[in-house]
Amino acid sequence: MKVTVHSIHFDADRKLVNFIQRKIDKLEQFHDGILSGEVYLRLDKSQDRENKITEVRLSIPGRDLFAKKQCKSFEEATDNVVEALRRQVKRHKEKARA
């Protein structure tokens, strides 16, 4: 699966990009037909400590799945987004079987 990482208004380091790639690749265990993924990393301008936003859009045949989470770190936000997408992928696959 091809994963594209976009960091808005900053440069993401290679370690973070590799972490995101590994996490998104694990979603292929739940659905073989995932075509691609787009990840957007943003910094919120609020003074709150939870100002890191991760958004992921997965393209699968028939529809796109989307999740967005805001946390203290990009790693934590990525973990939460992948968990939300895992639930969506499993739900979509079950509906497709029925």
Image: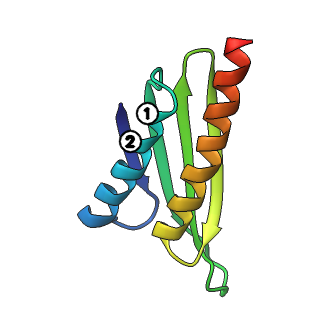
Which image quarter is the N terminus in? Answer: top left
Vertical position of residue 41 compared to residue 93: above or below: below
Label 1, residues with CA under 10 Å away: few <14, some 14-19, many ≥20: some
Vertical position of residue 85 compared to residue 12: above or below: above
Q: Residue visible at 39% across and 67% down?
A: 10
Q: CA distance from mark 1 to mark 2?
A: 6 Å
- x and y percentages locating residue 78 in the rendered image: 51, 59
- x and y percentages locating residue 2 in the rendered image: 34, 33
Vertical position of residue 9 compared to residue 91: above or below: below
In the displayed structure image, the side of residue 41 where residue 16 appears, left or right: left
Under mark 1, the amino acid is: Glu
50 and 30: which one is in front?
A: 30
- x and y percentages locating residue 55 in the rendered image: 57, 52
Label 2, residues with CA under 10 Å away: few <14, some 14-19, many ≥20: some
Q: Secondary structure at mark 1?
A: helix
Residue highlighted by disc 2: 25
Q: Residue visible at 44% across and 65% down?
A: 9
The dot on residue 89 is none
In the displayed structure image, the side of residue 20 where residue 42 appears, left or right: right
Coloration mode: rainbow
Residue highlighted by disc 1: 28
Q: Residue visible at 67% across and 85% down?
A: 48
Q: Residue visible at 68% across and 26% down?
A: 92
In the displayed structure image, the side of residue 11 where residue 37 appears, left or right: right
Under mark 2, the amino acid is: Asp
Which image quarter is the C terminus in? Answer: top right
Vertical position of residue 90 compared to residue 61: above or below: below
- Tell me whether circle 1 and circle 2 mark residues in contact (CB < 8 Å): yes
